[in-house]
Amino acid sequence: MSTDSRDHDLSGHPYDALTPDVILDSVEVALSVRCTGALQPLNSYENRVYRVDIEDQAPVAVKFYRPGRWSDATILEEHAFALELAGHEVPVVAPTIVDGQTLLRHQVANGEFRFAVFPWAPGRRPELNSRDDRVRLGRYLGRLHNIGASARFRHRLALGIDNYGRDSVRFLLDNPFVPDYLRTSYEQISKLVIEHCDILFQRHRPQSLIRLHGDFHLSNVLSWEGNVYLVDLDDTLTGPAIQDLWMLLEGSETDMAEQLEQLLEGYETFRAFDRNEIGLIEALRSLRLLHYSAWLARRWHDPAFPHNFPWFDTPRYWEEQIQTLQEQLAKLQQPPLQLQGSYNFDAW
């Protein structure tokens, strides 16, 4: 991941200077409008996202990108992918083009904020309780992946064991997050988990890697008056198609197998799915566990993180992580989910 040197120009914490006046001024200058002053923070920790009300117009959502995280090129690839999807009628909330630009800037005393404006898309986290719900969502993913497979990212991350696994563990152990009495246990179980992830990635190597949403869970899907919107491509990356499917599965193995069958029923209306990738589910789940802990650790200097995740900086969290990783290690050594007509795992 590359970053621009100017991303680090803001003194103190990156968001210290992001006051309500700055937010409203950013929108008014960029869009040549007058804001009503109504400002609602939305559920986002990595970036800062707000609903902003505008006089005589529909409200907008404004995302202020975390300084130091992405380069301009990576953000612009996110925007271009979203606009490409929207252009093919995939229901993605894409950034607004303002004077030919989607990545906007607002100067403050010690630097600048980069931001994007999006149409306001009301909605709530949908329920995914029925076959029809899963088939419908699978259709959206199949269409999304058809577009994702049509070109390649040049600047976005590619999901891998090194960047999601080894780099995450290294950061955690190089910094004082894991309590001393648990460090050896955490290091050992993480090493074993990563070794087995390596085995599964070799055994179930994807036929192709494509552009993905990357963080496709139900909190990034909005439902409103019969419509569904896909939001937040901030983590869009290159990887196997199953990455955008496995986070929608829950419950027992039988439950997850049934849910995946229904998702694929819709998905394969538009795109063939390589069922060999099902064998990557537990490896991807393991990498997400490691990556999530490292993400919290890397953001711990941001006051929003200790406030919203107070349990992270406690011995109990790391004790539970070790136990969870031990359970994951067992799952990594089990046969993958078995679906009707799926890849033959008899040789496992």
Image: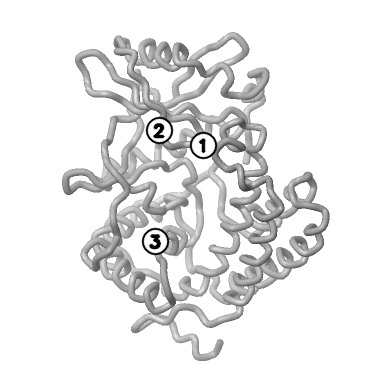
- Mark 3 and mark 1 in contact? Answer it, CB < 8 Å: no
Q: Is residue 226 left or right of residue 247?
A: left
Between marks 3 and 1, how big is the CA–CA gap? 21 Å
Q: What is the spatial separation of the Cα atoms under label 2 and label 1, in whole angstroms?
A: 9 Å
Q: Secondary structure at mark 1?
A: loop
Vertical arrangement, residue 31 with respect to residue 71, above or below: above
The Cα–Cα distance between marks 2 and 3, rounded to whole angstroms, is: 22 Å
The amino acid on which the numbered mark 3 sits, given as a three-letter code, is: Leu
Q: Amino acid at mark 2?
A: Leu
Residue highlighted by disc 1: 45
Q: Please tell me the numbered disc located at residue 42.
A: 2
Q: Secondary structure at mark 2?
A: loop
Is residue 17 shown left or right of residue 144? right
Q: Which mark is residue 248?
A: 3
- In which quadrant is the N terminus drawn? top right
**Which of the 4 quarters of the picture holds residue 344?**
bottom left
Estimate the x, y position of residue 9 in percent, counting from the top left. 65, 19
Position of the C terminus, as image quadrant, is: bottom right
Question: Residue 323: where, in percent of width, then height?
Answer: 65, 67
Instruction: Using the rendered view, name the quadrant where residue 92 is placed.
Output: top left
Q: Reading the chain from its start, which is encountered first: label 2 or label 3?
A: 2
Q: Please report the residue visible at 56 percent of the width from the left and 81 percent of the height from the top.
A: 334
Determine crowd level at label 1: few under 14, some 14-19, many 20+ residues with C-alpha closer than 10 A: few
Is label 2 in contact with label 1 (beta carbons under 8 Å)?
no
